[in-house]
Image: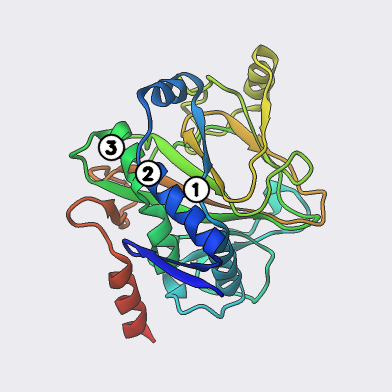
Amino acid sequence: MDLVLQFGNTVICGTRHETAKALRLQNTMNAMSDQKWVEFLKQGYLRLGCVLAEAELRQLCHRIDEIMLGRASVDYDRMLMQLDPGSGDYGDLAKQSKGFKVATLNHRKIQDLEYDAVFLEYLQRPLFRHICARAYGPETEVACFRSMFMNKPAHGGTRLRWHQDRWTFLDRDPKITIWTALDPSSVANGCIQIIPGSHHALINEESGSGFLTEEQAEAEVARADPIYLEVPAGNAVLLHNWLLHSSDCNGTDIARRAFSVCYMDAATQSTKGGIFPIVFGKSALSPDQVRRRVHRCR
């Protein structure tokens, strides 16, 4: 018989074993040791381990499938969506744009998922709040620069060349991203490649979005061997935004789905305008607010 367990705004449905595991995760994933934080500052990444119980993982996977197929009660007009081109070539990507386009599980990217209550509840986990307090200060309100689903469909996906995550239209660079594997992420299906310790300085400041030139990429790869960041489903990794990373296509029958959230100081200003919802702080967006907004739009 399935059980129902609730802590905070999170409700877990599953077997007794699954709900007990979820409770243990919630109790143990609320803080990070000083030693782990020092490790992150040195290497630019840190494995956070398993952060999703089996029932929670199934819930997120089901939710994103429903969103891709156009079946979810969400405000699609607020969400950026982009299809996978099928060629593997980044240059073939259509520009991402707001609004639902076609029912398919072959979306490459869906952004603005903080406006979905299920994903908002996840990205507001106590562990992630603690990490943001470490990065920005305990009294700093934290906004979501982007929360996005990234997908490399089976025998598809897009090659992503070496880059650092930064955007010149922001008046300060966001510092951290938390990347969660929804499927097992492996070398074969295009897992992230990283160069540990490469986050201490910007390499190509002239790039508006942090991409390296071919010459710069060759020099960085020659200087330090990249590693493949294989991640089991339900596990998360903390990444410094300046950490060099890239990825290849998916050569397997299994999709490589992930949920990536970039957290930033809520005081950040953009020359492009736009609204970056606060997710940690007194005026933080709540899942109930999102649900009410979707209900009014229906």
Q: Identify residue type, mark 1.
A: Val
Query: Label for residue 110?
Result: none
Residue drawn where x is 55% and y is 72% of the image: 67
Q: Identify residue type, mark 3.
A: Ala
Foreground pick, 85 / 45: 45
Residue 103 location in percent, x, y?
65, 76
The image shows residue 234, relative to residue 286, as above or below, that is above
**Structure colour scheme:** rainbow
Left or right, 294 with respect to 139, comes to right
The answer to whether residue 157 is seen in the rendering is: yes
How many angstroms separate mark 2 from mark 1 (CA)?
9 Å
Given contact means CB atoms under 8 Å apart, are the residues at marks 2 and 1 in contact? yes
- Circle 2 sits on which residue? 127
Query: Does dot 2 land on a helix, a strand or a loop?
Result: helix
Foreground pick, 87 / 11: 11
Foreground pick, 251 / 171: 251
Residue 264 location in percent, x, y?
33, 42
The image shows residue 149, relative to residue 204, as above or below, that is below
Q: Nearer the viewer, mark 2 or mark 3?
A: 2
Other-residue count near label 3 (Cα within 10 Å), few / some / many at <14 / 14–19 / ≥20:
some
Quarter of the picture holding the C terminus: bottom left
Foreground pick, 174 / 134: 134
State which tag comes first along the sequence, 1 or 3: 1
Residue drawn where x is 82% and y is 48% of the image: 251
The answer to whether residue 29 is seen in the rendering is: no
How many angstroms separate mark 2 from mark 3 (CA)?
10 Å
- Circle 3 sits on which residue? 133
Other-residue count near label 1 (Cα within 10 Å), few / some / many at <14 / 14–19 / ≥20:
many
- Circle 1 sits on which residue? 51
